[in-house]
């Protein structure tokens, strides 16, 4: 008797659950609260497109983080129904059959021929619903990147059905960047609805307050279909944002110009020393930059094998290593070749050009002709926002590094005995020699110092460019232009020349293009040198004046 009672209770319980399931399937709000996600997934393969819309809405209401990948698979056409039991599965063709996977847990479900499964069909309208559904699921995700992607997707699609959910997400959002994107998306959606004119005016004001290119694009796209009462306000907002963006473009060109200037300064400052003190036209200076970049590559590979935990600090070891290695190479070149060619500029030019070819071929023989990639540390990766522009961390650190190198070089020249001797040789070589200064030693140390600084420039360039045997060739002409324009041997002139040429180049590029901008700058420098052959800041000294 007791067994019969239990059996009757179980049958009644199953009957009521069946009735509840049928009611939930027919009525969307009740169905959306059903806890059986697997049954909801299987419902995607039943009925027509309206039934699939109901099933999608129900899956979204569960908040289950496994749902978005399933909906993406549905949109991509990789969701199938197994004909034998109407089970929804993920399917990928593998050989002659299809490999089956459970869409919820990813477990393998064997394989079947194509005749045993049927693809779940979707149309364009359903794909739109799926995109909106995925946005709904991800907008409240605990993962910041997922929420940001969802907010951008809603901004792009501007589905009015997302307005209520967007308001909830805005109330809970704490990340300023995501919240800004959500506010912009909400304003765009309001403009697409039948909201009162005051609400639409407030939405336009919200969009204008963002003042970025995305806001300007939104207003431009909204203007043709906007009510006549709203068009003057939208047009005024477009003009206001345009004026603001024009100012930010100036700031952007200035920042990018300073970034280019820092690279030019690092590449040219060593050449300014050797050219100014020794009067040597060193065509192998670019190869010193290249050797510094390869030194960085070698140091990083050695640390990867011996001390992978210190990879974030690889540049701390690469900078002195590049300075010492390229400095020693420079001293070797000066002692073996250049010291025999002083006073013969044409022979020096040809000799250093030949050395540059030898160094390039040597590097190709050791490392191969392909480009090498140096991985920047985490603190030099990514970007940061400055108003309406983005700037990379590696460019910022290169600017800081260039300033530090320039300051250190100034201290060496002003506060050390070697610097005093270098300045004496620059001013009057014969007089310095007669005063007991060993000019051959000063020449060797000067060439080594200039080459070492070029090697440090290679360390910086390895963070923003691929390391290749031809790396230095792209900077040798620019380096000579900076040195000649600023004044041969004058470090402050080199700094001013690098900043002037770098900023001017970035301001000309938007109008003339990269190639024509460089040609225009070269022509301007030629015209300038005709009027001031010694550059902006000419060194003074008896030997120079003579």
Image (cartoon, helix red, strand yellow):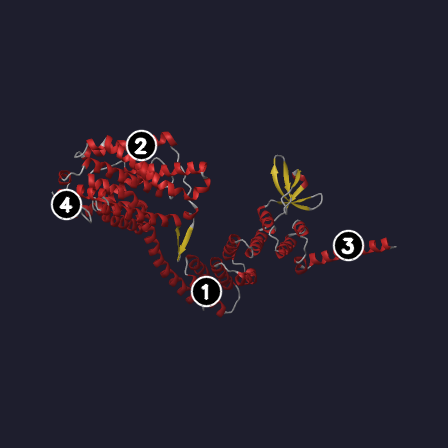
Residue of label 3: 14
Q: Nearer the viewer, residue 306 or 292?
A: 306
On-image quarter of the C terminus: top left
Q: Residue at x 71, y 43 (%)?
A: 84
Q: Nearer the viewer, residue 46 or 494?
A: 494
Q: How many marks?
A: 4
Q: Position of residue 142 (x, y in %)?
A: 55, 55
- Check whether the beta carbons of the residues at disc 4 and disc 1 lie within 8 A of each other: no
Earlier in the chain: of badge 4 and badge 3, it is: 3
Q: Position of residue 538 (x, y in %)?
A: 18, 47
Q: Residue at x 46, y 42 (%)?
A: 309
Q: Is residue 4 visible?
A: yes
- Determine whether 400 is above or below 115 in the image: below
Residue of label 1: 206
Q: Is residue 20 left or right of residue 55?
A: right
The secondary structure type at the circle numbered 1 is helix
Earlier in the chain: of badge 2 and badge 4, it is: 2
The secondary structure type at the circle numbered 3 is helix
Q: Residue furthest right?
A: 1
Earlier in the chain: of badge 3 and badge 1, it is: 3
Residue of label 2: 359
Q: Nearer the viewer, residue 398 or 140?
A: 398
Q: CA distance from mark 3 to mark 2?
A: 84 Å
Q: Answer few, some or many: residues within 10 Å of disc 2's Cα (few below 14, many 20 plus, some between 14 and 19).
A: some
- Check whether the beta carbons of the residues at disc 2 and disc 4 lie within 8 A of each other: no
Q: CA distance from mark 2 to mark 1?
A: 59 Å
Q: Which mark is residue 541?
A: 4
Q: Is residue 471 visible?
A: no
């Amino acid at each position: 008797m007791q067994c019969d009672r239990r059996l009757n209770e179980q049958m009644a319980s199953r009957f009521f659950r069946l009735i509840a399931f049928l009611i939930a399937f027919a009525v969307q709000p009740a169905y959306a609260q059903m806890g059986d996600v697997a049954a909801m997934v299987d419902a995607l393969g039943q009925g027509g497109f309206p039934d699939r819309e109901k099933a999608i809405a129900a899956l979204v209401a569960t908040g289950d983080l496994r749902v978005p990948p399933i909906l993406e698979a549905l949109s991509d056409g990789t969701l199938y129904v197994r004909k034998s039991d109407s089970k929804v599965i993920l399917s990928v063709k593998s050989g002659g059959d299809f490999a089956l996977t459970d869409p919820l847990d990813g477990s393998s479900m064997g394989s079947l021929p194509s005749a045993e499964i049927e693809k779940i069909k979707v149309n364009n309208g359903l794909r739109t619903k799926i995109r909106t559904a995925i946005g709904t699921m991800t907008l409240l995700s605990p993962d910041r990147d997922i929420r940001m992607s969802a907010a951008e997707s809603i901004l792009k699609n501007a589905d009015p059905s997302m307005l209520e959910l967007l308001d909830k997400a805005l109330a809970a959002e704490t990340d300023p960047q995501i919240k800004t994107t959500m506010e912009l998306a909400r304003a765009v959606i309001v403009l697409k609805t039948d909201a009162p004119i005051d609400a639409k005016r407030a939405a336009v004001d919200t969009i204008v307050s963002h003042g970025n290119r995305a806001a300007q694009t939104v207003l431009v796209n909204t203007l043709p279909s906007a009510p006549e009462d709203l068009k003057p306000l939208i047009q005024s907002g477009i003009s206001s944002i345009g004026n603001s963006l024009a100012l930010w473009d100036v700031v952007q060109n200035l920042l990018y110009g300073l970034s280019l200037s820092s690279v030019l300064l690092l590449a040219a400052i060593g050449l300014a020393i050797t050219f100014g003190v020794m009067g040597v036209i060193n065509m192998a200076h670019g190869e010193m930059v290249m050797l510094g970049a390869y030194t960085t590559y070698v140091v990083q590979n050695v640390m990867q094998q011996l001390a992978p935990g210190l990879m974030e600090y690889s540049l701390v070891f690469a900078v002195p290593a590049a300075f010492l290695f390229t400095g020693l190479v420079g001293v070797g070149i000066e002692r073996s070749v250049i010291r025999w060619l002083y006073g013969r500029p044409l022979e020096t030019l040809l000799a250093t050009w030949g050395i540059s070819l030898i160094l390039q071929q040597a590097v190709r023989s050791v490392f191969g002709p392909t480009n090498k990639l140096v991985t920047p540390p985490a603190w030099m990766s990514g970007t940061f926002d400055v108003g309406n522009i983005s700037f990379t961390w590696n460019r910022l650190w290169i600017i800081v590094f260039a300033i530090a190198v320039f300051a250190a070089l100034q201290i060496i020249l002003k506060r050390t005995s070697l610097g005093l001797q270098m300045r004496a040789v620059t001013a009057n070589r014969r007089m310095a020699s007669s005063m007991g200064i060993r000019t051959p030693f000063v020449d060797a140390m000067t060439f080594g110092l200039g080459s070492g600084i070029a090697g440090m420039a290679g360390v910086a360039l390895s963070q923003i460019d691929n390391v290749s045997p031809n790396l230095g060739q792209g900077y040798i002409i620019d380096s000579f232009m900076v040195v000649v324009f600023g004044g041969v041997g004058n470090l402050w002139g080199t700094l001013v020349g690098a900043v002037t040429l770098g900023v001017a180049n970035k301001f000309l590029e938007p109008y003339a293009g990269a190639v024509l901008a460089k040609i225009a700058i070269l022509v301007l420098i030629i015209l300038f040198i005709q009027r001031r052959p010694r550059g902006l800041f000419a060194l003074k000294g008896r030997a120079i004046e003579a």
